[in-house]
Image (cartoon, grey):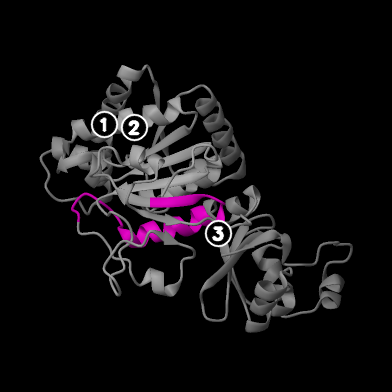
């Protein structure tokens, strides 16, 4: 497995808490220094690197003498606030020998969701990378609430890869790759597509400081792959893992990106926005969206949930109750309730002079 440096221009490197620490709150400084050397070598070869670094909550727990991740949100925020400074200081020390500067970037969904801030973050990341600065990114756990959280850093790293237009996402953790638990018992070297059979091989995590596990990693793979970004899951226990991957000798699982990725705006619709409400549709409308790539018409709408306005992003929910798409709605929730199930002639009579009669136009709709 090789990173093919001639083809890879930008890499997101996500490093789990289990890789960075040797115990609760105990940084493995030797490992971080080794990763610093590896990343510096990538930079020298012309590859831009963004780091998504876990560890702030765990470091805060260690400094505060805690052995178990707190259940209370404010206690987690407190741990993050204590640990963030320790983490970024350690990363800067790792890059000092190579004359490299790090930039700490802490985000919540509020920073990446609205279209204006979303584009501003992308522009800023591009500028940082062009200047040879290494962004060290983490969720801003010191202020995040449940509504603003990404869920875990696997998801955040995939969103960063999508936003930054990365060619490759490397997830370093205690897992050496995706293991074929129901077959050979060996690491799968390449996965072409995430299927139900592949998802059945995943497991969670039992770490007291970490969140997620292989389940969250496969969810991240789906986001990255649809963005045209390949993904490697490998073990961070090997201090020279990045060099080995570059040389084609590294052990891990490579997930192949989709050949025709979503464009930037549809990626924003799919993953960065929190839906303002739900539009429920029948089986016929779901088939039309999936098989014909059409717009969502009021005829197939069976229910409206929420208090959205025209221009908001909504989730489109299929007959089974599962979200099947997201899109920009062209009617308010109140208006949508009055036209649900009706054809375009009836809608035109209710809204004379209105040119756009689709509930969600196909150009502003993305299937999940």
Q: Which residues are magenta?
A: 207-232
Q: Which residue is at 44% across, 51% downward?
A: 231
**Magenta residue check for 220:** yes
Which numbered disc, 1 or 3, marks the residue that appears first in the sequence? 1
The percent position of residue 57, horizontal first and vertical second, equals: 25, 42
Q: Secondary structure at mark 1?
A: helix
Answer few, some or many: residues within 10 Å of disc 3's Cα (few below 14, many 20 plus, some between 14 and 19).
Answer: some
Q: CA distance from mark 2 to mark 1?
A: 6 Å
**Magenta residue check for 36:** no
* Image side of residue 112 versus residue 24, left or right: right
Between circles 1 and 3, the one closer to the viewer is 1
Viewer-proximal residue among 367 and 146: 367
Q: Secondary structure at mark 2?
A: helix
The percent position of residue 177, horizontal first and vertical second, equals: 32, 56
Please say whether residue 104 is visible from this viewpoint.
no
Residue 275, labelled with which disc? 3
Q: Are marks 2 and 1 in contact (CB under 8 Å)?
A: yes
Viewer-proximal residue among 14 and 243: 243
Residue bearing mark 2: 38
Residue 34, labelled with which disc? 1
Q: Secondary structure at mark 3?
A: loop
Q: Can you say which quadrant of the picture contains the C terminus?
A: bottom right
Q: Which residue is at 86% across, 71% downward?
A: 348
Q: Which residue is at 34% across, 41% downward?
A: 244
* Image side of residue 37 versus residue 222, left or right: left
Please say whether residue 210 is visible from this viewpoint.
yes
């Amino acid at each position: 497995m090789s990173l093919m440096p001639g083809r890879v221009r930008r890499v997101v490197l996500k490093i789990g808490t289990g890789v960075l620490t040797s115990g609760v709150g105990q940084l493995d400084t030797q490992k971080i220094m080794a990763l610093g050397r590896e990343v510096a070598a990538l930079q020298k070869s012309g590859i831009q690197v963004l780091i998504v670094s876990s560890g702030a909550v765990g470091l805060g727990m260690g400094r505060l003498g805690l052995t178990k991740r707190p259940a209370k949100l404010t206690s987690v925020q407190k741990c993050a606030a204590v640990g963030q400074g320790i983490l970024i200081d350690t990363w800067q020390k790792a890059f000092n020998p190579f004359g490299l500067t790090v930039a700490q970037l802490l985000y919540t969904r509020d920073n990446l969701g609205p279209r204006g801030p979303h584009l501003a973050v992308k522009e800023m990341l591009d500028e940082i990378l062009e200047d040879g600065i290494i962004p060290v990114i983490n969720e801003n756990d010191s202020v995040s609430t449940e509504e603003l959280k990404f869920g875990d850093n696997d998801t955040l790293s995939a969103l960063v890869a999508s936003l930054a237009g990365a060619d490759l996402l490397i997830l370093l953790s205690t897992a050496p790759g995706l293991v074929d638990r129901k077959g050979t018992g060996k690491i799968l070297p390449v996965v072409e597509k995430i299927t139900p059979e592949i998802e059945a091989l995943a497991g969670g995590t039992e770490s007291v400081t970490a969140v997620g596990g292989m389940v969250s990693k496969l969810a991240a793979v789906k986001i990255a792959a649809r963005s045209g970004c390949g993904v490697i899951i490998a073990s961070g226990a090997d201090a020279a893992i990045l060099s080995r991957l570059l040389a084609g000798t590294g052990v891990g699982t490579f997930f192949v990106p989709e050949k025709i990725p979503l464009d930037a705006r549809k990626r924003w619709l799919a993953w960065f926005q929190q839906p303002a409400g739900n539009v429920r549709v029948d089986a016929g409308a779901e088939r039309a969206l999936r098989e014909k790539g059409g717009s969502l018409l009021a005829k197939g709408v069976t229910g409206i949930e929420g208090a959205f306005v025209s221009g908001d992003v909504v989730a489109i929910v299929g007959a089974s109750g599962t979200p099947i798409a997201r899109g920009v709605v062209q009617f308010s929730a109140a208006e949508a309730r009055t036209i649900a199930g009706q054809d375009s002639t009836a809608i035109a009579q209710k809204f004379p002079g209105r040119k756009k009669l689709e509930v969600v136009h196909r150009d502003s709709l993305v299937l999940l």
